[in-house]
Structures are given as structure tokens and as C-alpha cells.
Image: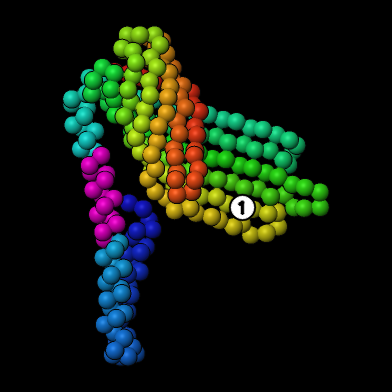
Amino acid sequence: MKKINTIHLKKALTSIFDLKNDSNKVPKKHRLKLLWSSLHKFNHRLVDISKRLSLVLSFLIFILSSKAQAIYTEFGISQSYKKTSFSTDNYVESEMLSGSVSFYIWEQVALEFSYTKGLAVRKETEVNYPIKTITQYSSVYGTDLILGFADRQSTFQPFIKGGAAYIEKRQVTQDAGNQPSQYNPKPGYVPSYGVGLKIKLTQNFGLSTSLDVWKDDSMSTNDLASRTGITWMF
């Protein structure tokens, strides 16, 4: 459970008890309005917590039931890194780490759950201007249906995928000598799709490379991730 939820609950409960203790200080006509506002905030937080618990429980139930019915299960981990330097104080650096678990319900069809964490840093400066550093953080929770074009025994196994992802982003801008500023776009669900290739090395281990795209229509942007990693099937 996120700490912020507990904080908001405490604030809501505190405001309710404060109303009771300070009832003599608040005009009578405003008491009901303030009490209703506090109860509304408290109820909103309870609904948010219930939704999160429902998602977690649904995910665990699905994993357990899918594990019992799946032909086989595949775990994967991949990473990408890139740095482009123009000078010591002018460069762009990015890193992405992903983990996934796939349940093959048929020989060439699987349901994949993944988590991708990204970090990008851009540092730039000009003559007579302070150094500016822009750091971007992203978290992507994906659910995709994978369709393969080769059986499990093939050495080369191309595939396509499509589904949806929940994306959270944060950007921090820091000018030398000044306080950092932060920008938090509204998180939300976006469609996702991609292509890839798996190369079988042994009966259970292999390599995997893929290109994934997350399309955010609300911001008119596309996020891309080119990744290479290993897979383990059993």
C-alpha cells in the first residue's frame, strides 16, 4: 500500500475529529458542509484503496489460474542503454530495464505481463548560461497478447504483440544554483504494440530482442523501447 494513501486517510479522519472538537468555533451553518466535505474525501480514498486491492487480487488470481492451465511459462529480463556526448557538460543518457512473465495458453499464443522502468538524463550548457539538467523517470505496467509465428522447437521465433499499458511519468528540471522544478503528467492507460524475435539457445534458455511502442493520444506522443535480453521457459 502506498504511503500517500495512509497520509490522506489520516488527514481525512483528523479533519472529521477536528470538526467535532472545534464545533463551538465553527458557525453552525458551515458545520454540515465541512463535515460532508471531509466525509467525501475520506470515501474517495477508501474507493481508491479498494480499487487497488481489487486489481492486485485479480492479478494474483489470474496468475494462479493461468499457471495451472498454461502449456508453459516464460520469464524474461532485458535492458537497454545509450549515451550520446557532445562535450563533458552536454550529453544525453538513457537507460531502461524490463521484466516480464508470459503464460502460453496455446503453443504460439501467450498473455504477457511486464514492467518497464526508464531513466533519461539530458545535460546541456551554453556560454554564459548555467548548466541545465533534465531528468525524466517513467514506469510502464503492460499487459499484451503475444502471437508467435514458429513453434517452440524452432531456433528463430518471430512474434508480434498488442495490448494496453499503464504509464507514469515524472520530469525534474535543475538549473545550476536554482531550486529544481518538477512536472508530473497525468498517468493513464494507453494502447501498446510491438514486434520481436526470440532465438532459442537451449531447451529452456534463449535470447530475445523486441521493439515496443506505447501510443499516448492525450499528449500526441509515442514512446518506443528497443530491448535485448534473455528468456527462460519451463
2 relative to 64, above or below: below
Which residue is painted at 20% across and 38% down in the image? 61
- Residue 73 seen: no
- At label 1, the amino acid type is Thr
Residue extending furthest right? 128
Which residue is painted at 34% across and 58% down in the image? 5
Left/right of residue 85 with respect to residue 169 in the rendered view: right
Which residue is painted at 70% across and 54% down in the image? 176
Describe the colour scheme in one phrase: rainbow
* Element carrying mark 1: strand
Return the x and y of residue 28 as percentages of the image width and height. Answer: 28, 90
Q: Which residues are magenta?
A: 46-59
| Residue 53 among magenta residues | yes
Left/right of residue 146 with respect to residue 223 in the rendered view: left
Can you identify the residue that label 1 sits on?
A: 173
Return the x and y of residue 60 as percentages of the image width and height. Answer: 24, 38
76 relative to 216, above or below: above
Label 1: few (<14), some or many (≥20) within 10 Å? Answer: some
| Residue 81 among magenta residues | no
Can you tell which quarter of the image residue 230 is in?
top left
Return the x and y of residue 31 as percentages of the image width and height. Answer: 29, 84
- Residue 35 seen: yes
Does the magenta stretch mainly form a helix, a strand or a loop?
helix
